[in-house]
Amino acid sequence: DSHDTPCRYLAREADCLVISVDYRMAPEFPFPQPVEDCWAAVTWIMENIGALGGSGSRVAIGGDSAGGNLAAVMCLLARQSGGPDFAHQLLIYPATDLSRGFPSHGELSDGYRLTKPLIDWFMDHYFSGSEQDRQHVQASPLFADDLSGLPPALVISAGYDPLKDEGAAYCDKLVAHGVAATHRHYPGMIHGFISMGGFIDTGIDCLRECGAELKRAFAD
């Protein structure tokens, strides 16, 4: 319902099949249930990839915001489980540190759509089950001790997004651990801009860049 347009653009620009996962959400299904749903989806997709018209050797994973968080966590789980070997991870303004320790959370706490009260509301719902450690790697992948061996990555950030610092930090950590990762920053944009292509040309430009990156990854 929310991401049909970005999914269509990625399918067209990357010339690929796109499978959008409607994982269950908090507060009815708090952490770690969305993580478990996404892993179940990954497992099912890989078991049925041929029937779906895809190739098991050329599967990428991605998402934006909370979806970027879950995509990054899926890559960690895949490495831990011995597969699947994703060809690429596309992380669009991902949440990688749910403890919210970076300066951008304070600097951009008001006025740019993803405000501090809204993030508080999201976090209170996501962690509405038993008390959870917000630095657990399945909640905050930035706190993983080792990111080596993960898929190549494109990490997108926006200049007026409180998540921008943690996205950049995750890309830096991937590179430091030997992963081929690229950080693409859109300085004039706010959180959610890829879904605003009907109003903001840069949203379409970003999706085209993401599609081109996926196409290269599949060709490699």
Image (spheres, helix red, strand yellow):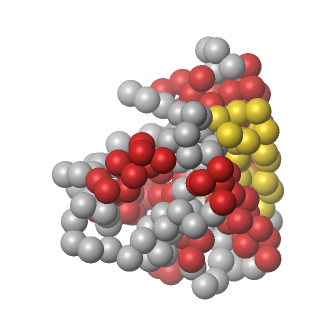
| Among the 4 quarters of the image, the one containing residue 159 | top right
Query: Which of 162 and 56 lies nearest the eye of the viewer?
Result: 162
> At 42% from the left edge and 71% from the top edge, which residue is drawn?
134
The quarter holding residue 17 reads top right
Name the quadrant of the C terminus.
Answer: bottom right
Residue 111 drawn above or below residue 152: above
**Residue 67 left/right relative to 28:** right
Location of residue 43 in the rendering, given as x and y in whole percent from the top left corner: 39, 62
Measuring from the top left, give residue 101's x and y in whole percent: 57, 67
Mark yes or no: residue 17 visible: no
Q: Position of residue 149 (x, y in %)?
A: 68, 77
Asked if residue 142 is positioned above or below residue 2 in the image, the reply reads below
Which image quarter is the N terminus in?
Answer: top left
Q: Nearer the viewer, residue 45 or 127?
A: 127
**In the rendered picture of this protein, how many numbered marks are placed on residues?**
0
Q: Is residue 11 left or right of 206 when viewed as pictured?
A: left
Residue at 35% in and 42% down: 22
Q: Nearer the viewer, residue 117 or 210?
A: 117
Residue 50 at x, y = what percent? Answer: 48, 49
x 53%, y 33%: residue: 113
| Left or right of residue 12, residue 75 in this image | left
Res. 165 in view: yes
Q: Taking 54 as reference, is 199 left or right?
A: right
